[in-house]
Image (cartoon, grey):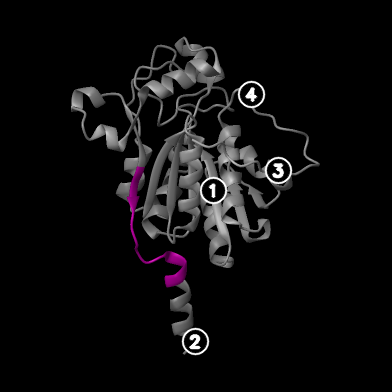
Amino acid sequence: MAPAAYINFEQYLRQDYRGLQWCPGCGDGAILQAFLRAVHELGISQDDMAVVSGIGCSGRISGYIDFNTMHTTHGRAISFATGIKLASPDKHVVVFGGDGDQTAIGGNHFIHACRRNINLTICVINNNVYGMTGGQYSPTTPHGMKTQTMPYGNYDQQFDVVNLAIGAGATYVARESVWKPVALTKFFKKGIQHNGVSVIEVVSNCHINLGRRNKMKSPHAVLDWIKGRTVSLAKAKNMSEEELEGKILVGEFVEKDKPEFTEQYYKLVESLKK
């Protein structure tokens, strides 16, 4: 595979910001690079894109990049993004949030954005834990794994973000891990171009608040754990249920056309003027 073309990412970053504050080895940096590469390859102006984030490690993305950005309250990024899209339907609107931010306190907003099929690109960064707020277990923490609030192992069953998005009506759904930045860039490009709600789940690592409690003290250890669990959809077709037990399927799950919420809203507005 040919190396990715060089991009001067500084043009997309706020140069007056105090510097990145992610832990060394955090997957958020790889996710941010894949997103910026997608924006660059699509040729989208920074003025034509709004990026919204909530609370959490991934919430810092909106502060680091030089777009139209909004850092919102916990779990409310999608509701803010919905308002932006309705007010400025010509803009590309992207939401970044963690698994806790978007499937716990923000779960209802996530479900109803999928149901409405509003033209947002929603990136769920899933590191299986509340990373920034102390390591509490989240709705995606695997059964049996230890966290700050589940010191003897999580006895809850976890959400499958992809199945949740599909069941709620999302019209573009993909999942990839930070191991595959080229594929992730492709999914970002397709999600941004898709006319409807796009959900892109990224399986990432938190070696500080998840890995260390589960005998994975380094970023590489958690990444190896993720790599060992991910299986492509194409490969999964030839695997048994027993072989797929505990595995994470990656790839594109849904891509379909359906009436988009903002367009339907403005059609209604215009009809009322007659």
**Camera-nearest residue between 25 and 262:** 25
Q: Which residue is mark 3?
A: 8
Depth check, front residue: 1 or 44: 1
Name the mark nearer the viewer: 2 or 3.
3
Q: Secondary structure at mark 4?
A: loop
- What's the distance in space between the residues labelled 1 and 3, CA to CA? 23 Å
Marks 4 and 1, the one that precedes in the sequence:
4
- Mark 4 or mark 2: which is in front? 4
Q: Is residue 149 shown to the viewer in this render?
A: no
- Disc 3 residue type? Asn
Residue 9 badge: none
Q: Earlier in the sequence, mark 1 or mark 2?
A: 1
Instruction: Tell me the amino acid under the disc marked 4.
Output: Cys
Cα separation between marks 4 and 2: 53 Å
Give the Cα distance between marks 2 and 3. 47 Å
Q: Which residue is mark 1?
A: 95
Give the percent coordinates (x, y) of residue 265.
45, 71
Tell me whether circle 4 and circle 2 mark residues in contact (CB < 8 Å): no
The residue indicated by pointer 4 is 23
Which image quarter: residue 141?
top left
- Left or right of 43: which side holds 137? left
| Span of residues in magenta | 252-264
Q: Earlier in the sequence, mark 4 or mark 2?
A: 4
- Name the residue at 56% across, 40% down: 34
Who's the residue at 37% across and 40% down the image?
A: 251
Residue at point 38%, 52% (across, down)? 172
Name the residue that disc number 2 marks.
273
